[in-house]
Amino acid sequence: MTSSLTFRRSAMSLAVLVLTGCSFIPTHERPAAPVAAVFPGQAANAPAGAELVSWSGFVQDARLRELIALSLQNNRDLRVATLNIEQVRAQYQIRRADQLPTLNLAASGNRQPTADGGMSSTYTAGLAMASWELDFFGRVASLKDAALAQFLASEEARRAAQTSLVAAVVSTWLSLQADEELLSLTQSTLATREDSLRLTKLRFDNGANSALDLRQAESLAAAARSTLAQQQRAKSLDLNALTLLVGQTLPAHLLPFGPGATTQAQLSDVPEGLPSDLLNRRADIRQAEQALIAANANIGAARAAFFPRISLTASVGTVSNQLSGLFESGSWGFSLAPQALLPIFDAGRNQANLTVAKVSRDVAVAQYEKAIQTAFREVADALAGRATLGEQLIAQQTQATAEAERFRLADLRYRNGVSSYLDVLDAQRSLFATQQALAQTKLAQQQSQVALYKALGGGWTE
């Protein structure tokens, strides 16, 4: 009884060994993050940030949400990333199928002359299994694990592409808002300067103004027309960029100007989080880690190549000297042909393959660490923008209010003959420059918020 039990256990162990084999894949250990424990300006004991909301929760403007949804459906870069997943998924299925035998229905016929001058015929039909590798040393399993990691990396690549797409659509939409605001400001300034030019020319014709005042007024009007052309070009370029991102002609009702347009997009606040959060939030970091796991598995396959490769060829079916007798009683048979190949001399090929696999793993480690460092830098930059752009915006708003009052007073003093026209022109130039800077700072503040959301891993959901 004891010997029977021992035999069954041994047989079971042998079966498990045949089916699973051993593995030479090195144990995967996530490299330590080569960044500081906290972001610059963050307290050392800062709590972990809350989970990021999806892009639809981050973007509050209904038109912009609809535009992002269109881009997720039609953007060609995202479509390519999605198709890459299907391609790599199929490659993984091929590697997984290598672990199982392949059965084929085979039929053959052979007719050849015999020594006595006659003819000999042989016909066979049945099932055939060709060169199924018994994966004792885990080579096929290692390749399958590498393909699985590459498949998971392709999924993370699509998520990273989606994050970049969402951020690009929002940023370009915000740029169009700023373009429209700057265009309106420039048109208003041009109208004011042309009115001023007409008044100055009238006063010059009547001897009340000098030629210098007239030329300065002409220069300011020409500068406004030049700026207007620049703003129209910038708006057209941003429209073209947004059209490419969305992947179709832009619906007029979804543009950030025209009837129902607001002064700025409504975006939710973004929790800061900690550097460790990036490892789970950032799709590009997760992609780099999967690439590292794949490189690790390739080392196992390269190591297994030093050991015997055992394959099995078998067939079962019927054999007959006559085609009509193929399926008669007594014609059935089978063949079994195991083969073992042990590398003895390969001119260093296996060792070179192992070296390549190890170096590839080291490269993957470096790329993983660089992905973390890049993510850390992007978050730090976005946090720096959020910390300072708000103060800058308040200061510029105060400056714009002061410049508007300065221009009003200078114009009033000039009309009453108290000051020269040069004061009016200088105040007008300063007011226009301050208003432009204010609009650009508003844009920078909003885009910094988008950059922080993207840098912390927002823009995609499971």
Image: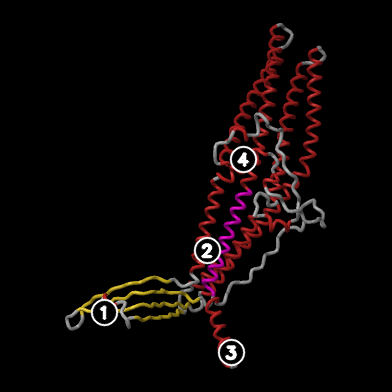
Give the distance between the C-alpha atoms of the residues marked 3 and 2, in whole angstroms: 39 Å
| Residue at left offset 80%, top offset 39% | 391
Say whether marks 3 and 2 touch (CB < 8 Å): no
Above or below, 455 relative to 366: above
| Residue at left offset 81%, top offset 55% | 46
Give the distance between the C-alpha atoms of the residues marked 4 and 3, in whole angstroms: 69 Å
Name the residue that disc number 4 marks: 67
Query: Where residue 207 is drawn, which disc sits there?
Result: none
Name the residue that disc number 3 marks: 5
Tally of marks: 4
Above or below, 404 relative to 437: above
Give the distance between the C-alpha atoms of the residues marked 4 and 2, in whole angstroms: 35 Å
Specify which label sits upstream in the sequence, 1 or 4.
4
Whether residue 395 sits left or right of residue 240 in the image: it is: right
Specify which label sits upstream in the sequence, 4 or 2.
4
Of residues 287 and 56, which is closer to you in this image?
A: 56
Q: Quadrant of residue 324?
A: bottom left
Q: What span is colored magenta in the figure?
A: 138-163
State the image coordinates of residue 399 (x, y, percent, origin top left).
80, 30
- Mark 3 against mark 2, which lies toward the viewer? 3
Q: Secondary structure at mark 4?
A: helix
User: In the image, is residue 162 part of the stretch drawn in magenta?
Assistant: yes
Q: Secondary structure at mark 3?
A: helix
Above or below, 47 relative to 401: below
